[in-house]
């Protein structure tokens, strides 16, 4: 899996999800933003980290029996044990929200480990308690039922579909108040650099609009506006 440098992480933490989604679109990636899962605590939603993926399928009783006997590994527990600091636990549950993959104790453990976030299109349990934990948890719902009632973990760190978006191990997930975007691992550095530039341009354009500039020619910026931006940027040393 690709490593995420501190520089790229810092840049992405300073830009917005809409900027990144737009830049990915322009670079040929049309389906990168998650629709459905929401922050359990809206005040804890900004994160950047690499994907540690968990694939689940509809539950089958013989699989559960084999796991209880020790004939099949408990991959839920293994995922929680193996995920590292700065990673995002990505749990693909095909939108099944009648069952919870994790609750407040597991969330606390992940927060202590330094995990960047948890993102799932399934549910969590005891969302009220999870909302007090300093860990971004993005989920599709809140359910008290154990995940083995409806889902079973079959694979770790394989490509998964999450809320209709493909996520590969090592891809970069980024979240803020606008939502969550998935950045293909080999595009992270390029998108981070482009996003910093875009945010700077939009800062300049927004200031002009606030000062009464007409929208046409200001946004999207025409050549005159771009020239003024470069002059402003040079004067500001940015």
Image: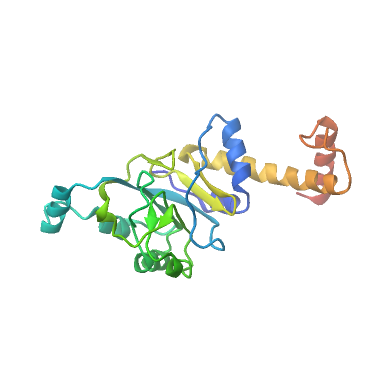
Q: Is residue 70 left or right of residue 33?
A: left
Query: Residue 140: x, y in percent?
Result: 44, 52
Between 177 and 228, the one nearer to me in the picture = 177
Residue at image location 47% in from the left, 63% down from the top: 135
Labels in figure, total: 0
Residue at image location 50% in from the left, 44% down from the top: 35
Extreme-right residue of the structure: 212
- The N terminus lies in quadrant: top left
Q: Is residue 229 left or right of residue 124?
A: right
Q: Is residue 50 left or right of residue 144?
A: right
Query: Residue 125: x, y in percent?
Result: 37, 63
Query: Residue 205: x, y in percent?
Result: 79, 43
Query: Residue 200: x, y in percent?
Result: 72, 46
Above or below residue 164? Residue 50 is below
Above or below residue 218? Residue 129 is below
Residue at image location 84% in from the left, 49% down from the top: 210
Between 54 and 113, the one nearer to me in the picture = 54
């Amino acid at each position: 899996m690709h490593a995420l440098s501190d520089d790229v992480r810092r840049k992405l933490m300073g830009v917005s999800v809409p900027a990144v989604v737009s830049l990915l679109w322009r670079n040929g990636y049309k389906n990168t933003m998650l629709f459905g899962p929401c922050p359990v605590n809206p005040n804890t939603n900004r994160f950047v980290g690499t994907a540690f993926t968990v694939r689940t399928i509809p539950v089958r009783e013989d699989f559960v029996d084999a796991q209880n006997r020790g004939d099949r590994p408990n991959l839920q527990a293994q995922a929680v044990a193996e995920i590292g600091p700065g990673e995002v636990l990505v749990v693909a549950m095909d939108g099944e929200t009648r069952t919870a993959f994790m609750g407040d104790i597991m969330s606390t453990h992940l927060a202590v480990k330094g995990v960047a976030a948890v993102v799932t299109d399934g549910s969590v349990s005891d969302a009220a308690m999870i909302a007090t934990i300093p860990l971004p948890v993005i989920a599709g719902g809140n359910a008290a039922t154990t995940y083995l009632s409806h889902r079973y973990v079959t694979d770790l760190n394989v490509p998964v579909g999450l809320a209709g978006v493909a996520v590969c191990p090592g891809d970069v997930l980024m979240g803020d108040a606008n939502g969550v975007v998935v950045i293909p691992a080999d595009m992270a550095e390029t998108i981070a650099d482009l996003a910093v530039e875009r945010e700077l341009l939009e800062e300049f354009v927004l200031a002009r609009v606030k000062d009464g500039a007409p929208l046409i020619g200001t946004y999207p910026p025409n050549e005159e506006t771009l020239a003024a931006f470069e002059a402003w940027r040079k004067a500001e040393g940015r």
